[in-house]
Image (spheres, rainbow, N blue to C red):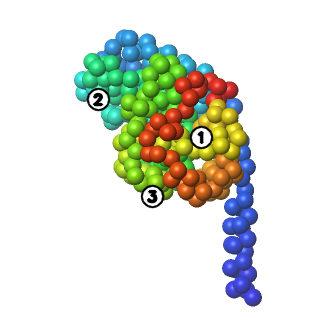
Amino acid sequence: MKKLLSILIPLFVFIGCEDDIEEATLAASPIEITYNIHESLPSDWVTEFNIIMKNLWTIIPSYENVFDHINIYAWNDKVEDPYPGINGGAYVGGPPSDKIMVLEIPENEFIYQSMHRYSVVAHEYFHVYQLSINKPMNLPNGNYDPDGFSIKWLLEGTAASFESIYIQEYYNHNYFINAQNNINEMVHTDPSIFESYINNEINYGSSVFITLALAKELIKLGHSEKIAFRMIYKDFLTSGVKNSNWQNHFADVFGISVKDFYYSLKAYTLDINSVLPSKSLSIKAIFN
Ligand SMILES: [Zn+2]
């Protein structure tokens, strides 16, 4: 009997937790941002960067749920990494006590006027927004946080599609077709491989495709396009999702199981044109 109880109690606790899908309580104060914008950057980029950050901050401010402050470092890659201890690249990282957003912009992007010099700002800021709600699973010290959330296509497919919707809306340029149309066959055969942070795609093209297909499936279920994107970009994130419970939260928020959704991907031609959102979709409408 004692043995049976010791089996039953953990089972009960486990089942009890599994159904616990409650909206996370979110903080009320916005985070503080410190800007470190290097003189190596062209002044017209700096002007545009300020406009983009102002737009994003107005529409999706980040609140003090996980960290209360972030340092943004930006520079032109023609100079040596100018901020001691800050590695180059484009990423959001660091522990909650020392959160950083890094934008090392390749000189070629200024020379060839690549849209990426602006889209990267929207992409990385979207990660700040995500990380202000959910902690990452992988910690900077190499450990894992069991309460973290790191399903790749749901973090990168969202950030990368967000950046393209931003570019479409503010620059009237289709960044989806120009940069994110490299879709792996595995989207049809085993989309679960895009759940892990492994390097198996170009510009997150497959993750973007899966994310946009999810919006199409939600529209089929009767949601408007802007609501579909709001569910993916915001409602799912703020549902208290963790890696350990993400499939339950997915079914709860979207009304479709992960398994059924993955199966539905087979019906889509692996071309970004088959899942593109409408050109009139705006970030403001999504988050309003
Ligand atoms: Zn990213």
The image position of residue 18, as x and y in percent, is 69, 61
* Residue 170 appears in the rendering: yes
The image position of residue 174, as x and y in percent, is 44, 26
Closest to the observer, 114 or 21? 114
Left or right: where 76 falls relative to 102: left
Q: Quadrant of residue 247?
A: bottom right
Q: Quadrant of residue 23?
A: top right
Helix, strand or loop at mark 2: loop
Amino acid tagged 3: Thr
* Residue 283 appears in the rendering: no
Question: Label 2 to label 1, Cα distance in Å?
Answer: 39 Å
Q: Tag 1: Cα neighbours inside 10 Å, few (<14), some, or many (≥20)? A: many
Q: Is residue 136 above or below residue 178?
A: below
Q: Which mark is residue 215?
A: 1
Q: Which mark is residue 81?
A: 2
Q: Sequence-wise, which precedes: disc 2 or disc 3? A: 2
Q: Sequence-wise, which precedes: disc 2 or disc 1? A: 2
In the image as oriented, which residue stretches furthest toward the bottom? 1
Say which quadrant the N terminus sits in. bottom right
Instruction: Report the residue marked by disc 3.
Output: 189
Helix, strand or loop at mark 1: helix
Amino acid tagged 2: Asp
